[in-house]
Amino acid sequence: MFTALLDAARNSPFRTPFTRVQCDDGSAPVAADTEKAVVSGRSIQAAATREVEFGSNEFFGLCAVGGILSCGITHTAVVPLDLVKCRLQVDQAKYKNLFHGFKVTVAEEGARGLAKGWAPTFFGYSAQGAFKFGLYEVFKIQYANMIGEENAYLYRTWLYLGASASAEFFADIALSPLEAAKVKIQTMPGYANTMRQAVPKMLGEEGITAFYKGLVPLWCRQIPYTMMKFACFEKTVELLYKHVVPKPRDQCTKGEQLVVTFAAGYIAGVFCAVVSHPADVVVSKLNQAKGSSAIDVAKKLGFMGMWNGLTPRIIMIGTLTALQWFIYDGVKVALSIPRPPPPEMPESLKKKLNVE
């Protein structure tokens, strides 16, 4: 895994343009004007970057690295929007709408107040991303092997849904403690300003249960969200290449493929936000209200109350999901991680169905 990271760093297009070619065997750099002296009549060509073996432990490990980068970076980048969204959910009387929420927050706490909760957001969603993307690849391959090639194609949407739900179950266990700390910091004025202040205080007041009392509603929010995120993305990519992109994926440049990835990610993100929003409101309110259960919070909010803050969340989640898939796919390109093309009907199934 670390060898692949090192190779990617060596071959990065962002290195200085004055860097000379470095041989893979560790020998001294060779200047361009002396290449003919190496082998008469033969020019030097860059060695092809070794591609990671699909389904290997290295493959899964590097997919987890891609998940860390895609989720950790994107969620931290939108902390100000997330903070206002959480406050809209728990106190709509004070924070009337998105713009008013920003105005009130800056007036009371200054611009720095918009960054509250960045540390638990970064560490929590980095851990979640590692499990979410890494285990998704694991479960997708394992489930496909269990049901066979033909069924994996015929029931591929169910395969995406099952693999993503299984991965998110474990990802939320990693996220829950830091999500609880984040919500405390963002929605309870004066409780704590940093993760270092919030975590010991929560542990002292409520014990270890403080970090996991929101786990069930977190599952209720994140598992449907992730199922929609992965299944919708996979199907959208398939449909874009089939009906919108004018040429097959293997004829598209890597840049064109990443544009398709971003577009499919944004479409998936909009659906994700709507599906998971009521549970997101309950999670925010639950971590603010000490001693309440998820059912108590849901009853108190009512049906309409569970849709507070939907607009900023659609903006946030749509952008987040698109960027996450873009970064994740970009990491795969940079580290030479296999990126299977959209699924095609197996030859054995074509013969059974008389499809040419």
Image (cartoon, grey):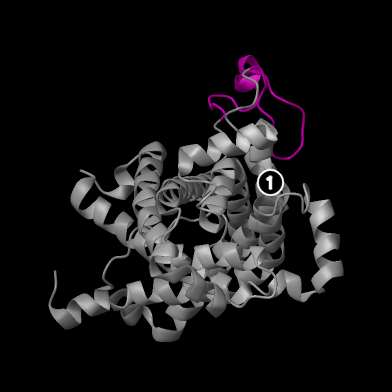
> Is 353 rendered above or below residue 41?
below
Residue 7 falls in which quadrant of the image?
A: top right
Residue 98 showing in the rendered view: yes
Residue 232 falls in which quadrant of the image?
A: bottom left
Screen quadrant of the N terminus: bottom right
Q: Residue at x 69, y 73 (%)?
A: 212
Q: Residue at x 84, y 61 (%)?
A: 201
Choose between 31 and 34: the one closer to the eye. 31
Answer left or right for 213 relative to 355. Answer: right
- x, y percent for residue 326: 47, 45
> Is 288 rendered above or below residue 292?
above
Q: Residue at x 77, y 28 (%)?
A: 28
Choose between 349 and 169: the one closer to the eye. 169
- x, y percent for residue 110: 67, 32
- Residue furthest front as drawn: 93
Q: Residue at x 63, y 73 (%)?
A: 215
- x, y percent for residue 348: 26, 79
- x, y percent for residue 165: 49, 74
Residue 9 showing in the rendered view: no
User: Mark 1 packing: few (<14 Cα in 10 Å), some, or many (20+)?
Assistant: many
Screen quadrant of the C terminus: bottom left
- Residue furthest top as drawn: 33
**In the rendered structure, does residue 271 fall within the stretch colored magenta?**
no
Give the residue number, with chain letter if any, for mark 1: 118
Q: Amino acid at mark 1?
A: Trp
Residue stretch rendered in magenta on the structure: 18-44
